[in-house]
Image (cartoon, rainbow, N blue to C red):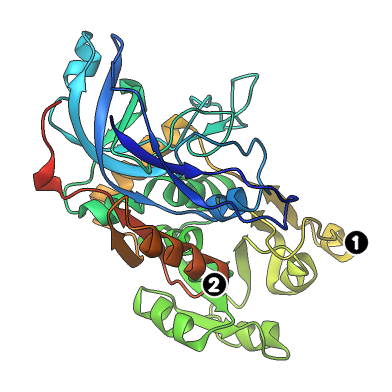
Amino acid sequence: MPKAIAIRKIDGKPGKVYYPLDLIDLPEPQPKDNEVVVKITAAALNHRDHFLRQHLYPGTTFGVPLLADGTGVVVATGSSSAAQKWKGKKVVLNPGSGWKDDPDGPESPKGYAILGGTKMNPLGTLGEFVTIDAGELEATPRHLSSCEAAALPLTGLTAWRAVMTKSGQAKPGRNILITGIGGGVALMALLFATAAGANVFVSSGSEEKLKKAKALGAKGGINYKEEGWDKKLMAQMPAERKVLDAIIDGAGGDIVDKGMRMLRPGGVIVSYGMITSPKMPFIMGAVLKNIELRGSTMGSRKEFADMVRFVESKRLRPVVSRTVSGLDNFDGINSLFEDMKNGSQFGKLVVEVAKENEVSKL
């Protein structure tokens, strides 16, 4: 029977527990008319997977394969022509369902159902096979390796919506600050905004991460642990435009207070997460300066397709921090979770499930 990795239930309260990994059996794939069977070659972690192991994510459950990011090869299909056209092709999976193309949010009354480890969606990518609707696939950009492709879906989609849809400032000559560089979303945001022609600046608590970000195209960067980092960042702005147009933020905290001093009137803060705290103040100074705060999470099926096409046309490469191989490599997979827990990664953490040349027919 096909294998996959889920979490195993043990006693413990949310936030205090840390569920162990569990190798589970899945039913033999039986694709319906418009479904395909994807043999997974690589899958990647996201912060939600770390939260799931602590029972800190909505709908945490057991017996559902972990991870939302995946790539592989279609090895079997249902009878429809829409499914059969994918046979033998390398694909990346849309990391969720329930959101077609509405710019405001998911059309499904049940909301957006992300793959991996919850009651909302029975599928996950940390396994040998995934049986999924053919409409949730995009062809893998041809210049990407399997591990690079696995690093793309969820963080790429989240960054695309935040930068390209919500900020509206990914344009030549505009100045954008991306906070917390080193995580997958922030790095994809850097790649997208830079490729669109914007001047991108980054923040981090690590000088090494700032240096790496500059090598990827950032115009400048600042260590947020330094006193007066906001003033030091403004000194790096180009002479012809000494203000920020947008901030792409996943931390929360005091970003509105700091950000309003750096943004032009009417500037935008796009928040895709709040890892510092689940709350952050929106102060009167930001109101008087007409600063806009826009929440952003994941993205639609249309945005996913647009993002993948942009990656291929610009030949962008997601940054992979580290890779381990094998579904039975629990020590290696757990070490990736430790990297995420410690915040030591620069880029995505990837599990190579199978070599591309190992793909066999069912």
Q: Which residue is mark 2?
A: 343
Percent from the top left, x then y, of residue 124? Answer: 43, 37
Q: Nearer the viewer, residue 188 or 148?
A: 148
Count how many numbered circles sit on residues in the image: 2
Element carrying mark 1: helix
> Label 2 is placed on what type of residue?
Gly
In the image, taking residue 284 as reference, residue 33 lies left or right, namely left
- Look at the numbered discs 1 and 2 and tell me whether their residues touch, using CB distance below 8 Å: no
Percent from the top left, x then y, of residue 181? Answer: 51, 71
Farthest residue, direction front: 11
Q: Residue 175: give its label.
A: none
Q: Residue 284: give its label.
A: 1
**Relative height, residue 218 to residue 145 (above, below):** below
Residue 362: name its quadrant.
top left
- Residue 174 makes an appearance in the image: no
Q: Nearer the viewer, residue 172 or 345?
A: 345
Residue 274: name its quadrant.
bottom right
> Label 1 is placed on what type of residue?
Met
**Relative height, residue 18 to residue 238 (above, below):** above
Question: Residue shown at 63%/73% (left/top)?
Answer: 243
Q: Quadrant of the N terminus?
A: top left
The crowding category of the residue bearing disc 1, from other C-alpha atoms within 10 Å (few below 14, some 14 to 19, many at least 20), is few
- Residue 151 makes an appearance in the image: yes
**Relative height, residue 315 to residue 3 (above, below):** below
Of the residues tagged 1 and 2, which is closer to the observer? Answer: 2
Percent from the top left, x then y, of residue 69? Answer: 40, 45
